[in-house]
Image: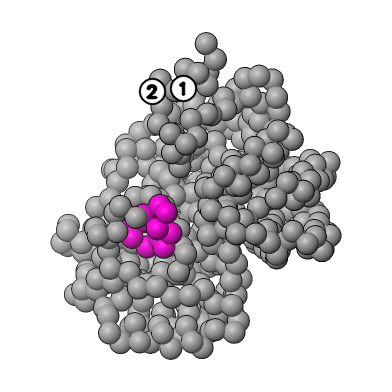
Amino acid sequence: MSIKQRDKKHIWHPLTQHKLHPETMAIVKAKDCLLYNEDGNEYIDAIASWYSSMYGHCNDFITSRVYKQMQQLDHVVFAGFTHEPAVKLSEELIKILPNNQEKVFFGDNGSTSIEIGIKMALQYHFNLGDKRNTLIAFEDSFHGDTFGAMSVSGLSVYNGPFEDFFIDVKRIPTPNGENNETILAKLKDITDNNKIAGFIYEPLVQGAAAMKMHNADGLNQILKFCKTNNIITVADEVMTGFGKTGSFFASDFMETKPDVMCMSKALTAGLMPMSITSCTQDIYNAFLSDDIGKGLFHCHTYSANPIACSAALAGLELLQSQDIQDNIKRIISKHKTFGKHIKTNKKVKSIRQKGIIFALDLNIEMERYGDLRYKLFNFFMENGVFLRPLGETIYIQAPYTISNAQLNKIYKTIEDALEIV
């Protein structure tokens, strides 16, 4: 019996309505930018397996570091203990984070990094005797699937059954350069009439909102407003972090830096689950007290797992290497050339790009998980390219190690797919 047949007996897959789409594909091997299924077919991983495996799958440099760590220390409780991989990772990460970041708190996935960031924002004010109960977030945002993360997310397709249980959140549009003053006026109104603890945002690119991109200057104005009003700013860099926007972090493009940053996905190069929530010294200081209850009482069993830390350290080393930085520049250039070409196609409504993130919108309305979306997905897979359209949006976020030939195949497959819509 095949793996995919055995799968059906017990497994409940994420983001899947099994009655409508009961079939899965069994992947048995991954190397560099390729996935291999149990039938021997290969597929270019054009989205780096949800933006995580940015240095290619089973990268020898990373796996060798992880193997070495496995022989030394596999796991230990992180409450009351520490270890070299975690300490070294904190030192190396702080070097590339915005210069106001001073402390790191370990979690185990993107959603939990958001939960920690939300807790930091709410408890910061609580500890200072200024209880605030409301957050601000962007329209169409997505921050994860745990309850705090869902509360600040604005995509009802994920959140519908749970909305009655959420934290109070006020929403603002993303800035586009023309609505900046309108947003600031709305922010003032929200702040005047609510006790705002924090503003959580995806800087410059909203991933689950179909790679919706917004204006850096407008975001900077929002962040300045928040600073002036003592609103804790929480940057969700789970998707955008570690080089994807053309800088180490999307927050690098704004003059005003966040108070808190949330990281996961490419943090460990897609090899191990882990997250980090970093913050300023000021945030950390608000939790220092003779009152034990003012500490940040949040913990995960696998916080700062040494093996995951070793993967992250290897990934950071690769990210800062000349080869990877050159590859990022090459991919950006290739996307720009493809964008100039494909935007003339009458089936294409618009294109956008930030760093190695490229997206195009089809000139047709589609349901996010409708039949046409699945028709496109199947076409891509049949042609050896793994892409996951978000409604009418087709996007590319391939590993930094992808070759020009592989990029060209992705581009051609997308162009060919336009003939079937």
**Where is residue 256 drawn, in percent x and y?**
52, 76
The answer to whether residue 248 is visible is no
Q: Which mark is residue 330?
A: none
**Where is residue 420 drawn, in percent x and y?**
73, 46
Residue 154 located within the stretch drawn in magenta: yes
Q: Main secondary structure of the magenta part?
A: helix
Q: Nearer the viewer, residue 406 or 223?
A: 406
- Residues under numbered marks 2 and 1 in contact, where contact means CB atoms less than 8 Å apart: yes
Three-letter amino acid code at disc 1?
Answer: Asp
**Where is residue 356 drawn, in percent x and y?**
69, 56
Tell me the crowding category of disc 2: few under 14, some 14 to 19, or many 20 or more residues within 10 angstroms, Cα based.
few
For the point 50% across and 64% down, the residue is: 202
Can you tell which quarter of the image residue 352 is in? bottom right
Q: Nearer the viewer, residue 206 or 216?
A: 206
Q: Is 270 drawn above or below residue 233 in the view shown?
A: above
Can you tell which quarter of the image residue 332 is in? bottom right
Residue 132 located within the stretch drawn in magenta: no
Q: Is 333 drawn above or below residue 179 in the view shown?
A: above
For the point 38% across and 50% down, the residue is: 145
Residue carrying label 2:
10
Residue carrying label 1:
7
Q: For the magenta stretch, what is the residue range? A: 147-159
Q: Is 240 drawn above or below residue 213 in the view shown?
A: above
Q: Nearer the viewer, residue 233 or 208?
A: 208
For the point 59% across and 42% down, the residue is: 374
Q: Secondary structure at mark 2?
A: helix
Judge left or right: residue 66 versus residue 289. right
For the point 27% across and 84% down, the residue is: 193
